[in-house]
Each structure stands twice: as C-alpha cells, then as structure tokens.
Amino acid sequence: MRKWISVSSPPIIIVLLVSFGFKMNFNNQGVPKSLQANKSTNFSFPQNEDYAEHPIVLPPFIGNAYIGFKEAMAFKESRGKYGVVNSLGYLGKYQFGKGTLELVGIYNPDYFLVNPQLQERAFKTNIARNKWILRKDIEKYVGLEIGNSHITESGIIAAAHLAGPGNVKKYLRSLGAHDVNDNYGSSISHYIKYFSGYDISMILPKRNAKI
C-alpha cells in the first residue's frame, strides 16, 4: 500500500501544480488597464437578422479609450465589416452616407468601400469635424442628465454619426424633446446612452476637417 502511494503521489502533485498554473494564466497581469474589461456594453441588432442561420457573436469589451469606442460603433453599424452596403446605400464598417463622405473629402465611394485604411481615416476625420460643430454644446451639456441618460462627449459624437450634428444640437437644446430615429429604429437618445463614457479626447476638434 505504501509503495503504491509513493509511486502515485508525484504524478498527483504534478497534476495539481499544472492545474494551478493554468488558473494563474487567466488574470489581468500584463494587460494595459485601458484594455481590461470592467463592464459590459449593450448593443442592439437588426430586427430582420436570421439568428438561427447566423449566430450572434458579441465583440470583446476592449476598454473605454478611442479603440473601444470605434469598435463598439463599428459592431453596431456593420458588425465590423468593411465591405457592407446596407439597403439605404450606407457604406462600409461605419456606414457612411455619400454626402458625409464628400464633407470629409472622399468622392469615390467604390474606392472607399474596398479601402479599410481610408474608412478608418474617414471615421476619425468625421469625429474631428463633428467635435468642432458641436464644441459649444459639448461644453454646455456634458455632465448633465437628459431623459434617463448621462450626457458625455462620446455619446454626443456617436449620436452625431447617426443623425448628423444639427439634429444632435436640436436634441440637446430641447432637452430631449427633439429625438430622431433612423430607418432601422435607432435614435439619438439610444446612441447617447449606449455609447457614453468613452474617452475620445485624443481626437481634437477641427474646423472643416478633411482627409
């Protein structure tokens, strides 16, 4: 009996040590704080999606800095796919309209659709443009509560991407009375709430920002 114990114990000890070793590998050591998950992010999905045929895959929460903001926006708009054109003709990962593309200096939608780098630049440039247009409203309303939403800069900018900065100005100045829905049911109030709290301060306001 003792001989069996003496032979069996080392493998058992090794198994236990390996087990503890695997558990230790799943902590957050070495991961930048801005990339660590600290809360869940809510998303709404297209109402006509065939979930049985196409299972839902949620993106990882990758922090509240700019990269987290842009990837959350991209997932909401297109599930992060650069080559998407929706039923209304909106293009790419961030679902730009042709008119908005022209405002940031892009006049070839076909080239835009197959150029991921250009799509990323367009998104960042449009944020700078909208920050300039909404700079006074950002200064005045950030930190306030409108409806059931805490107003933040990222929420305002997300809503401007959806409905345009002019409609966001009307929403804020009417204290939520002027809300706008797109053809898929997303509203200014929805974007302000669900894209709040991201730090996009790295992008500075720029008048007539263009690529």
Image: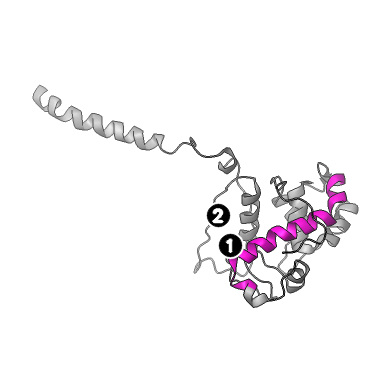
Disc 2 packing (10 Å; few <14; some 14–19; many ≥20): few
Question: Residue at point 74% right, 62% down?
Answer: 162
Closer to the camera, 118 or 188? Answer: 118
**Amino acid type, mark 2:** Pro
Tell me the chief SS of the magenta region.
Answer: helix
Find residue 202 and report its horizontal and vertical position in percent.
Answer: 70, 47
Find residue 32 and report its horizontal and vertical position in percent.
Answer: 55, 39
Q: Is residue 160 magenta?
A: no
**Amino acid type, mark 1:** Gly
Instruction: Give me the disc on residue 50.
Output: none
Find residue 101 and report its horizontal and vertical position in percent.
Answer: 73, 69
Determine whether, in the image, residue 2 is placed left or right of residue 129: left
Closer to the camera, 167 or 29? Answer: 29
Q: Is residue 136 magenta?
A: yes
Q: Which residue lies under the disc numbered 1?
A: 80
- CB under 8 Å between discs 1 and 2: yes
Closer to the camera, 153 or 14? Answer: 153
Which portion, as a residue range, is magenta? 112-140
**The N terminus is located in which quarter?**
top left
Question: Residue at point 73% right, 56% down?
Answer: 158
Find residue 161 and report its horizontal and vertical position in percent.
Answer: 74, 61
Q: Which residue lies under the disc numbered 2?
A: 59
SS class, disc 2: loop
